[in-house]
Amino acid sequence: MKKEEIYERLNEVFRDVFDDESIVVNETTTSADIEDWDSLEHINLIVAVENEFGIKFNMGEVTTMKNVGEMVEIINNRIS
């Protein structure tokens, strides 16, 4: 799967989790860029991303991801 496809699918997940159709994520997107992205929504987001891609993040990955670009790298490595 190409990274562009991952970003397209992530956009849909983010829009669904945050109930905001205007969200467009990129490699530098962080929680500071999305108004409702707090610790509780982070958990919901992680679960939604795992379900979308059929993967499981480990706790170390969840706590060290700094931006969406790092999330895409992990997803890409898992599904390749």
Image: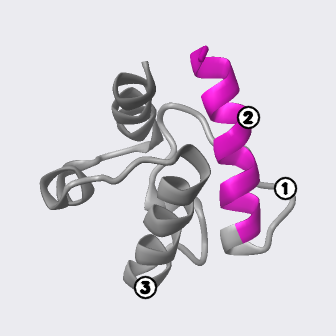
Mark 1 is surrounded, within 10 Å at the Cα level, by few (under 14), some (14 to 19) or many (20 or more) other residues, namely few
Between disc 3 and disc 1, whose residue precedes? Answer: 1
Type of amino acid at the residue the image marks with label 1:
Ser
Residue at numbered disc 3: 40
For residue 7, above or below residue 39: above
Queried whether the magenta region covers residue 9, the answer comes back as yes
Q: Quick one: SS at disc 2?
A: helix
Between disc 2 and disc 3, whose residue precedes? Answer: 2
- Residue range in magenta is 1-16
Q: Quadrant of residue 59?
A: bottom left
For residue 59, above or below residue 57: below
Q: Quadrant of residue 16?
A: bottom right
User: At x 18% / y 51%, what residue is drawn?
Assistant: 64
Give x and y (percent) for residue 51.
55, 58
CB of mark 3 within 8 Å of CB of mark 1?
no
Left or right side of 70 for 34: right
